[in-house]
Image: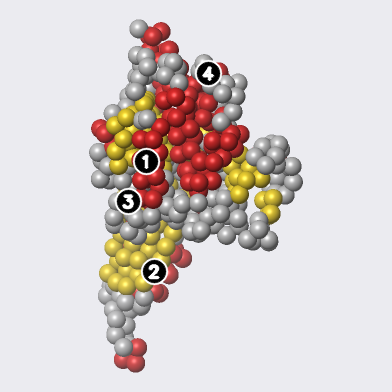
Amino acid sequence: MPQDTPASFDQELETRLVRYAAIDSQSDANSPTSPSTTCQFDMLRLLEAELKEIGAQDVELTEYGTVLATIPATAEGPTIGFLAHVDTAPQFNATGVKPRVIKGYNGGDITYPDNPALVLSPAEYPYLAEKQGHDIITASGTTLLGGDDKAGVAIIMTAAKHLLQNPDIKHGPIRIAFTPDEEIGRGVAKALPKDLAADFAYTFDGGEVGEIVYETFSADGAEITVKGVSIHPGQAKDKLVNAIHLASKIIQTLPQSVMTPEVTDGTEGFIHATDMVGGSSEMKITLILRDFEREGLAEKGEIVRKVCDAVAATEPRAEITCEITPQYRNMRYWLEKDMTPVDLARTACRKLGIEPISVPIRGGTDGSRLTEMGVPTPNLFTGMQNIHGPLEWISVQDMAVATKLCLELASLASDTEKQDG
């Protein structure tokens, strides 16, 4: 651990996460703007002000909605980036979040004041059973917490403040980025890799202590448009083509007992219908396609196209189109060629007495896109659990370990540079 690191950052992390989580910053995949929601600016502007207040340099809120800042070097070393995203997931209510802190968790079931039927049980979630005595932060039962990824924001801000207050800690240049719209796959603007100007980076957007991720899903999005023939139903015989019926056929023909999120795990990919909207004249179906390998992802796209073609062949008067859009790719394809940032994180973990865990995650991060765009960016733990739902929780003490990892990385990179030189 870097010299002069305090034994605990618990209180600062708790205060920051409770403050940040109470701010609505949910993203919206249906919005064309960047950021996708104006409420994200409440978080972005707050962080811009806080970074200036603690003495960070080059603080700016870019036109694409990312807050950037610099912690000046105190020694020679590579430029490292630390990133977290400010938006919360659109899958569950994130308005009116009321964070609460359960001090010295007693190891039993956790109930919720605003939803008495909801129970977070260590019997169902074994990682919680390991946190007896920790301070646990949850929401009140009707919203998600938003620790994904405001925990990452709190960790980076706490580490940044400590480094700026302790210039005797040796580290190279550090760049900080707080991004919008990660949850909808639009967190990395084309200009970000150049503006970040880091040799490599880390996102703090992971789960249990020790997690160092360098394998993620590869991801595409699919949008199917079904255009029928509209006519008054009283004169519809042999003329009406109902788009709802055709869209339903597409859904029914796509894999259901296999290749869906609810029946896959490990390294299995899936096709997931996320939305179906419209009416009898026109329907839109939105899907996400996921696989760890490019070939598997391409195969899933081909399945979707063939289903659309097959349904279209049953009704030539309809117009069915399928547009597949790349989202991100497995960061492993690039990181396996140079594991330096992964190895550095593993070394930092072990110096803190933690055995690193690296397993493929069934999701993606801003680091997936950044790595693909030339900035190697593994993902590191924060402690967040049960994300994207009302049972989301995090241990303050886990966040403190992640903060110490952030500091260790900054110091260790500088030491490595000296050894290499």
The percent position of residue 230, horizontal first and vertical second, equals 29, 81
Q: SS for tag 1?
A: helix
9 lies left or right of 406: right
Establish if 281 lies above or below 389.
below
Tell me the quadrant of the picture where the N terminus can be found. Answer: top right
Label 2 crowd (10 A; few <14 / some 14-19 / many >=20): few
Res 277 label: 2
The percent position of residue 329, horizontal first and vertical second, equals 37, 39
The percent position of residue 182, horizontal first and vertical second, equals 39, 46
Res 35 label: 3
Q: Which residue corresponds to mark 1?
A: 49
Q: Residue at x 30, y 51 (%)?
A: 34
Q: Cα distance, mark 3 to mark 1?
A: 18 Å
Q: Residue at x 25, y 32 (%)?
A: 194
Q: Residue at x 67, y 51 (%)?
A: 120
Give the residue type that dot 2 points to. Val
The residue mark sitting in front, 3 or 2, is 3
For the rendered model, the colour scheme is secondary structure
Ranked by sequence position, the earlier of labels 3 and 4 is 4
